[in-house]
Image: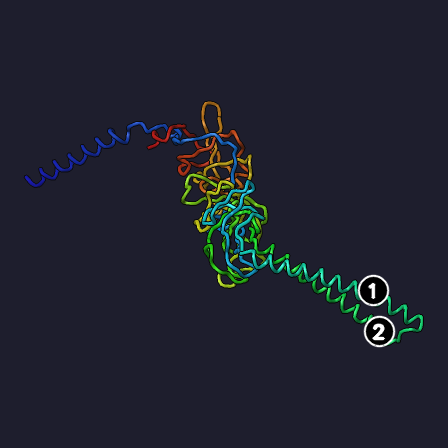
Amino acid sequence: MKVIRRILYLLAALVLVFFTYWYGYKQKPAPDAEEKKIVPVEVETVSTGSIEETIQLTGWIKAKQVVDVASKVPGRIESLRVLSDGGDFAVVEEGVSIRKGQQLAIIDHDIYLAQLAAATSSVTAKEVELADTEREKKRIIALYEGGSATEQSKDKVATAAELAAASLDLAKANLELAKLNLRESTIVSPINGIVTAKHIDEGNMVRAGDRIATVADMQNVKVIVAVAERYGAEISAGMPAKIRVDTFAERQFEAKVYSIHPALDAQTNTLQVEIHLNNEELLLKPGMFARVTLITKQKADAVVIPRDVILGGKIGEHYVYVIEEASDEKIARKRFVEVGIKQADMYEITDGVKAGETLVVNGMNFLIDGISVEIVRIEDIK
């Protein structure tokens, strides 16, 4: 009996639990099946702006033109000083500015002045000699025509006159050489620039061809960079570039592509590109490490949106979500877009979205086309 009673109690408890569940939960009214899900999103207005596509490269600052100024004549360096237009002298040393044609050094003039004097005297003597032979030639020819002189004597004076003329020409050439050597004994700078190295001191002897100083054009500098072959079609002479150096980290220097070497480097299979930039302030020094940005594409008034809001693209088309007003609701609409210029975290949109539209910039991963949304701040989403 006790066992039967326990079984009955157990069955009664189960029945009680069943009815409690049935009336307490199953019979409770279900939520409104028609209630719509609303997704919180953050938005911003689509705007236009400048955008550019770039290639990042590195290189070294170099002087646009570097000249080793050498002596064309031998001798002792009498002066190693820069002569200004006002007649003042500045000792030649590293950092001294000099203009094209400005005196840099003087080789002892004494020997060249003596050579010039000797060459001048030689010309004078040869002119007198030629005049004498010409007179004698005329006299003999006159006698020959009168029958008083032989043909042999006529030929002899003619030859003497020719030799005297040739001797005068040689003397004149030596005179020009003496003048040239005297001029070359005053050494001038062939370019505008700055003395970057002095190779000899005042008072030393030099031979023809010995270097005196190195002058570099610092008002214009260049950077030569190696560009990967795949970018070759995107680069052209005259295209803009931007230069940064560590010394002036906050400053950006504007430059342009000057030339593109016609052949690839055989070892690196890269294209050598030469970039020129103005350096009137002389801030950039040869040897500085340069970070170069080549601007391959540029647009001033483009529809620009953040890269992170663009979905798809790996397999299907790129798309974004924009907000449209529908009566009292805000609806997310899926828009397929065409991407143009890409700049870091910003992309140009060439089709699909217009300036002034409301773009979803946070919460777009939880959206489907046509879903209702609530516009909130990003702090609220978190």
Tally of numbered tags: 2
> From the viewer's perspective, is residue 239 above or below residue 124?
above
**Which numbered marker is on residue 148?**
none
Q: Outermost residue toward the top? A: 328
- Residue 143, horizontal then vertical, whole percent: 90, 70
- Residue 295, horizontal then vertical, whole percent: 53, 44
Along the viewing direction, whichever of 167 and 329 lies nearer the viewer? 167
- Identify which amino acid the numbered label 1 is placed on: Arg
C-alpha gap between disc 2 and disc 1: 14 Å
Left or right, residue 144 beside residue 180: right
- Identify which amino acid the numbered label 2 is placed on: Asp
Q: Earlier in the sequence, mark 2 or mark 1?
A: 1
Q: Residue at x 44, y 41 (%)?
A: 345
Left or right, residue 301 beside residue 17: right
Q: Which residue is mark 2?
A: 155
> From the viewer's perspective, is residue 193 above or below residue 114?
above
Can you tell which quarter of the image residue 124 is in? bottom right
Q: Which residue is mark 1?
A: 135
User: SS for tag 2?
Assistant: helix
- Is residue 191 in view? yes
User: SS for tag 1?
Assistant: helix
Along the viewing direction, whichever of 155 and 207 lies nearer the viewer? 155
Q: Residues within 10 Å of mark 2 (few under 14, many from 20)?
A: some
